[in-house]
Image: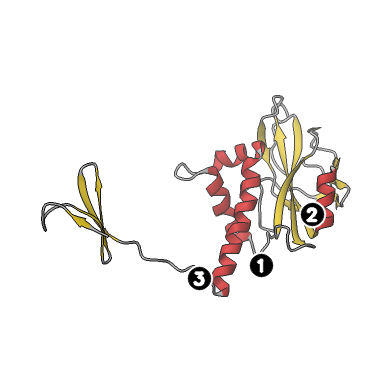
Amino acid sequence: MSEINNGILGKMTGSIGNITGKIRNGKNILALKPSSTTIPTDPESVARREKFAQVVKFAKVVNDHASLKLLWQKMTPSDISCFNYIVKTNYPSFLNGSHSANTSITPFMGFPVTTSAAVLAQTGINLTVNPLANAYNFNPELETKIKPEVILSFANPVNTALPSSLFYSVELPVSSFVTDTEITFSVTFNDYVKALFQQYTANSALVALVTLDNNSTPVNYSQTLII
């Protein structure tokens, strides 16, 4: 229902056809009614929405991780939020409904890292990193500690009532940073994480190394490994 005050040249409130009127700050504002939208249901549109949802899940876990967020903030352009930058950076890397070898929990251009052992199991994770002396020109006076940052990925639930996938951050201990020897990291998962391994048949770990100063402030970071 619409109402026009003071004749044909008066103020209109309500709707006539596809035109709607309202009073804002004493001014009569006329506008077209918003057209109804239909969410596309074709396979490509559905896949695109599911992919975006996956990347958002991933980016939220990364953005909620204090050390990782600090690294991303340093690289984020001024016209975009850190969270949106993580989404934008990693969106192309999600393929066939999941992350890929190009997905990264740290910004790009991290130092290279290789392992002599990398085991992910329901009980925990064990990682042995090869010497890093030739990986980057580290500052041993500043970078005194090193810590692996780990985000677990779970997909293909055994029960359709569960989320189709999820990401979960786990803490591993900090080690002294010595560049000319192997460094081994390990952690035993808690009961909640162990249960996730039973509830999902596809699992992996995205791992990056972060060097720290004496105050445990992140200094440098590696590329992301997928285990």
Residue positioned 61% across, 55% down in the render: 55
Which of these two is toward me, 204 or 167?
A: 167
Which is nearer the N-term, disc 3 or disc 2? 3
Q: Is residue 126 left or right of residue 13?
A: right
At which x and y percent is residue 102? 66, 58
Dot 1: few (<14), some (14–19), or many (≥20) neighbours within 10 Å? few
Q: Is residue 133 left or right of residue 65?
A: right
Residue positioned 42% across, 66% down in the render: 37
Q: Amino acid at mark 1?
A: Asn
Residue under pointer 3: 40
Which of these two is toward me, 21 or 173?
A: 21
**Quadrant of residue 172 within the rendered picture:** top right
Residue positioned 48% across, 45% down in the render: 80
Q: Amino acid at mark 2?
A: Ile
At which x and y percent is residue 34? 35, 61
Q: Is residue 153 left or right of residue 93?
A: right
Q: Nearer the viewer, mark 1 or mark 3?
A: 3
Helix, strand or loop at mark 3: loop
Which is nearer the N-term, disc 2 or disc 1? 1
Residue farthest along the bottom direction in this orientation = 42
Q: Nearer the viewer, mark 2 or mark 1?
A: 1
At which x and y percent is residue 18? 28, 65
Residue under pointer 1: 96
Residue positioned 81% across, 57% down in the render: 199
Residue under pointer 2: 227
Which is nearer the N-term, disc 1 or disc 3? 3
**Quadrant of residue 24 within the rendered picture:** top left
